[in-house]
Amino acid sequence: MNSIIKRSNIKYLFHCIIFFLVSLFLISFSSIARAHEEPLEAAKLIRSHFPNMEIDRIAKTNIPDVYELTIKDAVVYYHPRTKITFFGELWTFNKVNLTEKRKNELASTKIKDLPLDKAIKIGNGPNIIIEVVDPDCPFCRKTHEYFEKRNDLTRYVFLFPIIEIHPEARKKSQHILCAQDRQQAYKDALSGKLDKNLPEPCDEEAVISLLNQHEQIGKQLNVRGTPALWINNQFVNGANFKQIAFLLDDPS
């Protein structure tokens, strides 16, 4: 009789455990589903508030009911209930600029599908650097000088002459892309050797087409100034040597 009761208790306990595990799974699944539903519903509502605006991405922030909107390379914040949009930067208490961090993350996602075969390749090191450069930009020349001292880099350079500031930059870019040794021609330009002895610009159709592609890549990356750098997939805006050294694990 006791053995029958024991078996009955074990069977009951087994059913309770199964019921508990199934309930836990359903609760967890429901929570996951709600977590996916809420941003989707919020995004749908927010887009309805801005029917004529191309919003690339909508994400939650750590502030309740405030959402991050990515519009091209800009990041803005929106509170759907009050329909208030605010611009500026979010900082944490320990002085981390969340807005700048997000912009850098977004910038880094843009380089995944770049046609690197169109770039000027320099070096074969383990650190991968993508550069958007104006050959007459003094800060581009400083970063080039810094990179030239290292032998652990693979650099992919896209030319982006800003002729409003540097009238000769496009001619130098054409000269670089026309050269048989583009790598050496680039180094000559960035070291200043072409500043007083610039050869006649090359007007070959293929060279003009390639330079146009380089400039288009710069525009697609929303480059506003040079140099624009991606070091091991991390974006660096300008000649920020502290950040560059950190990303290259340079103790100096």
Image: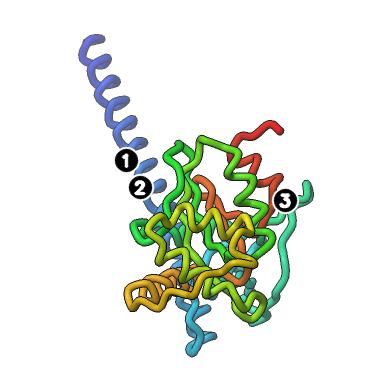
- Quadrant housing the N terminus: top left
Q: Classify residue 22 as left or right of residue 1.
A: right
Mark 3 touches mark 2? (CB < 8 Å): no
> Which badge, 3 or 2, comes first in the chain's sequence?
2
> Which badge, 3 or 1, comes first in the chain's sequence?
1
Point out residue 44 in the picture as x, y percentages from the top left corner: 45, 77
Q: Classify residue 17 as left or right of residue 56.
A: left
Q: Nearer the viewer, residue 74 or 161?
A: 161
**Residue at the image position 60 percent from the left and 39 percent from the top:** 149
Point out residue 114 in the picture as x, y percentages from the top left corner: 38, 61
**Residue at the image position 60 percent from the left and 78 percent from the top:** 163
Q: Is residue 198 above or below residue 167?
A: above
Give the Cα distance between marks 3 and 2: 38 Å
Q: Residue furthest top?
A: 2
Mark 1 touches mark 2? (CB < 8 Å): yes
Give the Cα distance between marks 3 and 1: 42 Å
Q: Quadrant of residue 18?
A: top left
Point out residue 20 in the picture as x, y percentages from the top left corner: 36, 36
Sort mark 3 into few (<14), some (14-19) or many (20+) by Cα contacts within 10 Å: few
Q: Secondary structure at mark 3?
A: loop
Q: What residue did someone put label 3 on? A: 96
Q: Amino acid at mark 3?
A: Val
Q: Amino acid at mark 1?
A: Val
Q: What residue did someone put label 2 on? A: 26
Q: Nearer the viewer, mark 3 or mark 1?
A: 3
